[in-house]
Amino acid sequence: MSSSDSPSPDSENTIPPKKLSDEDQAKVDRYLKSGHNDVERKPFRPFLLLGIILVVLTVLSLLSLFIARTKGVV
């Protein structure tokens, strides 16, 4: 790998061009700081999600076994 393949250290620190004017950016910042868009959420409970997935998977598996037995497949 040559030295031209690696990114130069200056390219990591470059600031992207502005998409908003300073006035519009100030309006966006003021809106975000106002708290109007904050929503209180319950904490994520991964074990509850895992339990729901396991229950749904078990019910679907039992349903498929029931259908297979009534049709004489199993």
Image (spheres, rainbow, N blue to C red):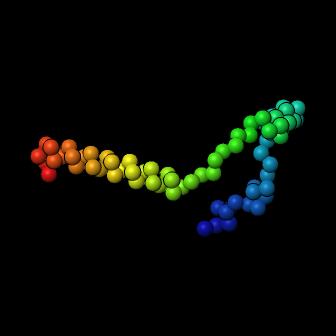
Q: State whether residue 68 is above or below residue 20.
A: below
Residue 8 position within the rendered picture, expressed as x and y whole percent measured from the top left: 74, 60
Residue 25: tell me if it is visible.
no
Q: Residue at x 83, y 40 (%)?
A: 33
Residue 62 position within the rendered picture, expressed as x and y whole percent measured from the top left: 27, 49
Q: State whether residue 8 is above or below residue 31.
A: below
Q: Residue at x 70, y 60 (%)?
A: 7
| Quarter of the image where the N terminus is located | bottom right
Q: How many marks?
A: 0
Q: Residue furthest left?
A: 72
Q: Residue at x 29, y 50 (%)?
A: 61
Q: Nearer the viewer, residue 8 or 14?
A: 14
Q: Is residue 38 left or right of residue 23?
A: left
- Residue 23 found in image quarter: top right
Q: Is residue 32 left or right of residue 7?
A: right
- Residue 12 found in image quarter: bottom right
Q: State whether residue 57 is above or below residue 35.
A: below
Residue 66 position within the rendered picture, expressed as x and y whole percent measured from the top left: 21, 46
Q: Residue at x 16, y 47 (%)?
A: 69
Q: Nearer the viewer, residue 4 or 51?
A: 51
Q: State whether residue 55 is above or below residue 21.
A: below
Residue 27 position within the rendered picture, expressed as x and y whole percent measured from the top left: 85, 32
Residue 72: tell me if it is visible.
yes
Q: Is residue 26 left or right of residue 6?
A: right
